[in-house]
Image (cartoon, rainbow, N blue to C red):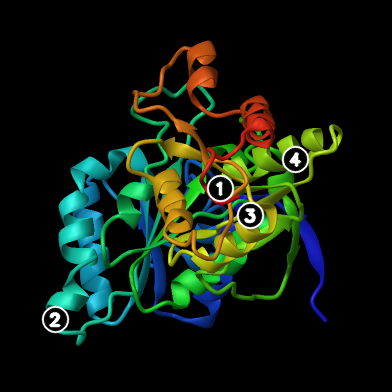
Amino acid sequence: MSTTRKLTMAQAISEAMAQEMTRDPNVFVMGEDIGAYGGIFGATGGLLDKFGPDRIMDTPISETAFIGTATGAAAAGLRPIVELMFVDFFGVCMDQIYNHLAKNTYMAGGNLKLPVVLTTAIGGGYNDAAQHSQCLYATFAHMPGLKVVVPSNAYDAKGLMIQAIRDDNPVMFMYHKGIMGLPWMAYFEGSSNEVPEAGYTIPFGQAKVVREGQDATIVTISQMVQKALLAADELAREGINAEVIDLRTLVPLDRAAVLKSVAKTGRLLIADEDYLGFGLTGEISATVAENLDTVVLKAPIKRLALPNVPIPYSRPLEQFVIPQVKGIVEAVQKLMQARMAEGVAA
């Protein structure tokens, strides 16, 4: 019988990697400062001592080189985990990601497997400015050939990481810095939770209803799940019962779970920390719009996300552009007051 302990997301991710490295000698980890330092956000803490430098490899600051190396190693039968320190740095290595890692299985007629897990840190909220604070998961979800995983808590992070390592396709595993449980960064307590010691997997494409409700649906992902739950608690004190859906993965996307919830509540808010334009909020909105023959809305859909501006260094300005708990509460309150236009089914 497996026991559980409360872990941070960083501890859960590291434990998942360690268990898979023990199970499968083909798994290894590469990246900047992932060895002795344990990863700048703690995702590889303790792995160097357990597995040594042949399987836990610090790399030079050359993202194109080590992501290309991971793709080649995967083609040769290994199962690399490679860390891009900040997703904001993807510009220097994008050719390796989207022209090689994402497409070579297709280009080889399906005769080539590329089981690479590309981990990267996302998100703002700690004054790291425009080049270290973005989420950008919609950018990767937009391109065919990549699975995109974005956990909101330690339990999910471990199960999804093991699933990612065992997947024969490239997986982007994107963790928000603000929920890793780092001692030097304020974080949402809900992201640290009970995690079984034994290994387990969480299938991709299965969203989770993390709070049930009848009045409105909040669809969200990553750190915004924790903010949405706090907002739902506040709304409940006003008599508004919001249902919160954690998508867990963007590719594959559990559209059925979204439609089922919206069919029940009739109201939808999408809360996101990625950019508003051409992103997750638009994709979810379109999914519901394309199914209005089966889903009846009581109010127009609302979207809450980062406006299409660079993320400011100034703390007040950063807090203004990144959606906060208060903003989610106000958006749902407006959603409850809104009505469909006359002549529109409701």
In what element is the residue under mark 1? Answer: loop
Comes first in the chain, label 4 or label 1: 1
The residue that disc 2 covers is: 108
- Give how far apart the Cα atoms at labels 3 and 1 are: 11 Å
Q: Is residue 63 left or right of residue 52?
A: left
Q: Residues within 10 Å of mark 3 (few under 14, many from 20)?
A: many
Q: Kindly state the secondary structure of the residue where label 4 is placed.
A: helix
Instruction: Specify which label sits upstream in the sequence, 3 or 1.
Output: 1
For disc 2, the neighbor class at 10 Å (few under 14, some 14 to 19, many from 20) is few
**Which label was assigned to residue 232?**
4
* x then y, percent, for residue 100: 17, 64
Mark 2: amino acid: Ala
Between 337 and 120, the residue placed more toward the observer is 337
Task: Measuring from the top left, give residue 150's x and y in whole percent.
Answer: 50, 54
Q: Do we see residue 186 in this rendering?
A: no
**Which amino acid type is marked by label 4?**
Ala
Q: CA distance from mark 1 to mark 2?
A: 34 Å
* Residue reaching furthest to the left: 107
Q: Which mark is residue 222?
A: 1
Give neighbour class at mark 4: few <14, some 14-19, many 20+ (Cα, 10 Å).
Answer: many
